[in-house]
Image (cartoon, coloured by chain):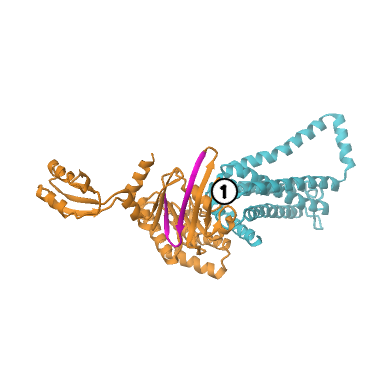
Chain colours: A cyan, B orange
Amino acid sequence: MKNDILTVIWKERKGLFRIRGRRAQALLGMFSPVLLAIFLPLQEGVEWVQSPLSLLLAFVAPLILVGISIPDSFAGERERHTLPTLLASRLSDRAILFGKMITSVAFGWGVTLVLLAIGLVTVNVAHWGGPILFYKPSILLAGLAFSFLVAMLTAGAGVLFSLRAATAQEAQQTLMAVLLIPPMILQFVVFAIMGSDSGKARFQEVLSALSFEQVILVIVAVLLVLDLGLLMAAMSRFKRARLILG
Amino acid sequence: MTETAIRIENLTRDFETVRAVDGLSLEVPSGIIFGFLGPNGAGKTTTINLLLGLLEPTSGRAEVLGFDTRTQPDEVRTRTGALLEHSGVYEQLSAEDNLEFYGRIWRMPATERQARIKELLSHMGVWERRKESVGTWSKGMKQKLALARAMLHRPPLVFLDEPTAGLDVMAAATVRDDLEALAAREGVTVFLTTHNMAEAERLCAQVAVIREGSLVALGDPDDLRARSGGPRLEIVGRGFNESALQLLRARPEVVAAEVQNQHLEIDLREETDTAPLVSLMVSAGVAVEEVRRGKASLEEVFLTLMEEQR
């Protein structure tokens, strides 16, 4: 199956930057992460590499990048009527699924790493103070893990939404809406808690009881569980008969 | 390869309340172009999906190249090529990359793959345009590319689902020519669905006609024409009159005689000597310019079959 997955990756990679009619949309999608990777380091200076601020980029960038590429890869393939021919070939369902997911995740994760590097260069150039600044090891590790797990999460959810959507655009919109709702709810909850003095005190108490590494581990564990769940769901739903009828 | 490329036994497929394929049974011999004819919605595409193992039958079974489509679908897909309802070409890729991708899927060695791509694209007359993005190509050229893709790995059997549908006359003719030449050269069995009767008549050694998922006729086009419409005589000329027609209709070998635009069409009961009928017309004052013997066209047979099933 390895060779079949590599074959699908070969094709996906060729088509990744040639999304016909959606080039402007793809460029627009790239614009926000690139802006974050330059603007925030410029504004925050040394804090960018010392505080968890850069983790924002590790969360947002793969979500946007994979959120664009995965619906195009799955719903777009059906929309362009190329999926039935692919399904009529000797490729297994798993080879097609994994080949497409790996390409999107590698694209989203790879570009995010490049953006983190751009942020680092920006800080060093704009706030040069002698020694070369580098991310704190725990921040860097968390950034690597976060960006990969968020890319996987978006890919898994993207497959499921793409299987139900009529077009790639519909899948992209639904995916983005659904993935952005939980962080927004979390933000509202945090604001609500922080609104009262007792809530604020309790929140700070909980936070101070946990180390940065413990918080990161909890988030990684939650993302890992979500990723595995979504991957299993995608594997069970990405079946020929279902796709032909869809 | 087995003598029978496809064996279908009582194949049925339901979609909720709709029966798309209804107890279909037939055999397709190896090495021929087999026409699978039927109107829109007759179940042709569903049958192809069942034969490729993309759908499971509700009941019945099918064997393709000796493999059961329900239990060995991977074996079937490994040994067949397909041009389905849509060309399925990747418009953002070049023609060469489209074939390269499928060549890799079929695990063709790199040198063989490249030679075969050149051979097919040259045969189709598009080798010089192989680096162009397929999105810029005409529909006819895309169909040619899709045909090349279906034949790329030299499968013993290819499924072609209306390969000339939606093409202009010229494009359809070139795709048909390519198909005929490739099939003859490579000895491949072709399962061809179409509702273009002239195409089926020209290309197919055998045809099956289905309506509402059921088989209504099976045989070679000549047999079907002979079975569904008797021999026919066509006289082109001037001066056809009612008394001449009455004389003609009184003859025992004549079933019917009608005049349309200086064409007298006579349906005969059986193959017979037609000289007396021509003499009769001449003696009745008809100026005969041309006489043709013939049989009903496949299109007429098809229309008759569809009418009978109503």
Instruction: Assess disc 1: are there few (<14), some (14-19) or many (≥20) residues with their C-alpha within 10 Å of its C-alpha.
Output: many
Dot 1 corresponds to which residue?
A: B56
Q: Which residues are magenta?
A: B18-37
Disc 1 is placed on an element classified as loop
Instruction: Tell me the quarter of the image containing the C terminus of chain A.
Output: top right
Q: Residue at x 55, y 63 (%)?
A: B103
Is B185 on the left or on the right of A197, as rendered? Answer: left
Reply yes or no: does residue B35 show up in magenta.
yes
Using residue A207 as the reference point, say whether residue B168 is left or right of it: left
Where does residue B148 sit, x and y in percent of width and height?
47, 61
Q: Nearer the viewer, residue B246 or A85?
A: B246
Q: Is residue B239 left or right of residue A195?
A: left
Amino acid at the residue labelled 1: Glu
Q: Chain of mark 1?
A: B
The answer to whether one can see residue B307 in this image is yes
Residue B247 spot, x, y in % from top left: 14, 44
Q: Nearer the viewer, residue A26 or B251?
A: B251
Query: Residue A11's image quarter?
Result: bottom right
Magenta: predominant secondary structure element?
strand
Q: How many marks?
A: 1
The extreme front residue here reads: B252
Q: Position of residue B115 (x, y in %)?
A: 50, 69
Question: Which residue occupies the foreground of this view, A111 or B127?
Answer: B127
Q: Is residue A190 above or below residue A225?
A: above
* Residue B43 is inside the magenta segment: no
Q: In the figure, B308 relative to A126: above or below?
A: above
State the image coordinates of residue A243 (x, y, percent, origin top left): 58, 47
Q: Is residue A22 visible?
A: no
Question: Image point 79% across, 35% down: which residue?
Answer: A190
